[in-house]
Amino acid sequence: MTPGPSGSNAASHVAETLSRAQILLDVVTYSPEETMAVGRELAAHLPPRSLVLLEGELGSGKTTLIKGIVAGLGAVREEEVTSPSFTLVHEYGRENKVYHVDLYRIEEPRELATLGLEDVLGQQATVLVEWGEKLGDPAPTPCIRIRLEYVAGEDRRIIVERLEA
Ligand code: ADP
Ligand code: MG
């Protein structure tokens, strides 16, 4: 079948999207401990100064995964990582600095401006952003996007993608 004009538009959109996003990992975990273990392993493979956007509904495991990543980066121990839902930004570690941002309470792009995220992104640090989709489109690239999905009970799907500029 020869694609018509709309077909080729769709095809070029697919091609463009596929070239931007590359799936690095797609796994299901069966406990919070297992999700943290995935986070520690991910940390070992993150390029320095990575920007990591985490997406997924409340309770899907974003903070739990971040505990593992932060511990894996050697910034602080897992139990010292808590959700910055009210303060919006937490800073961990000294030499290996990690910023943990939670945009849950951000309702409009205008509010982002008051957060000083540019300063955070300009640091020699790994930046982990819960509700990363609220950074808007296009997100700063290159970056890593992690989507978490509630499957059932304690089962969570974790999809890690690399987004290229
Ligand atoms: P979010 O930051 O996405 O709102 P949290 O990490 O704060 O999510 O909460 C996830 C909740 O789900 C925690 O209470 C955690 O104990 C529970 N949980 C159960 N199974 C898992 C799993 N496989 N991975 C991550 N969290 C899980
Ligand atoms: Mg959270």
Image (spheres, grey):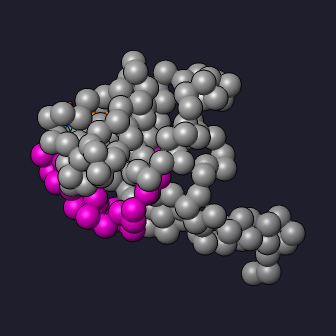
Task: Determine if the magenta segment contains residue 124.
Answer: no
Task: Determine if the magenta segment contains residue 46.
Answer: yes
| Apparent side of residue 57 relative to residue 70 in the rendered image (left or right) | right
Res 37 → quadrant:
bottom left
* Residue at 54% over, 48% down: 122
* Residue at 41% over, 51% down: 125
Where's residue 72, x and y in %?
A: 21, 54
Q: Nearer the viewer, residue 138 or 59?
A: 138
**Please, which residue is most extreme toward the front here?**
95
Number of labels in the image equals 0
Q: Nearer the viewer, residue 36 or 114?
A: 114
The reply to whether residue 141 is in sight is: yes
Where's residue 132, x and y in %?
A: 50, 41
The reply to whether residue 56 is in sight is: no
Res 32 → quadrant:
top left
Q: State which quarter of the image contains the N terminus.
A: bottom right
* Residue at 60% over, 24% down: 114
* Residue at 38% over, 56% down: 159
Res 113 → quadrant:
top right
| Apparent side of residue 59 relative to residue 122 in the rendered image (left or right) | left
Magenta-colored span: 24-53
The answer to whether 101 is drawn above or below residue 145 in the figure is above
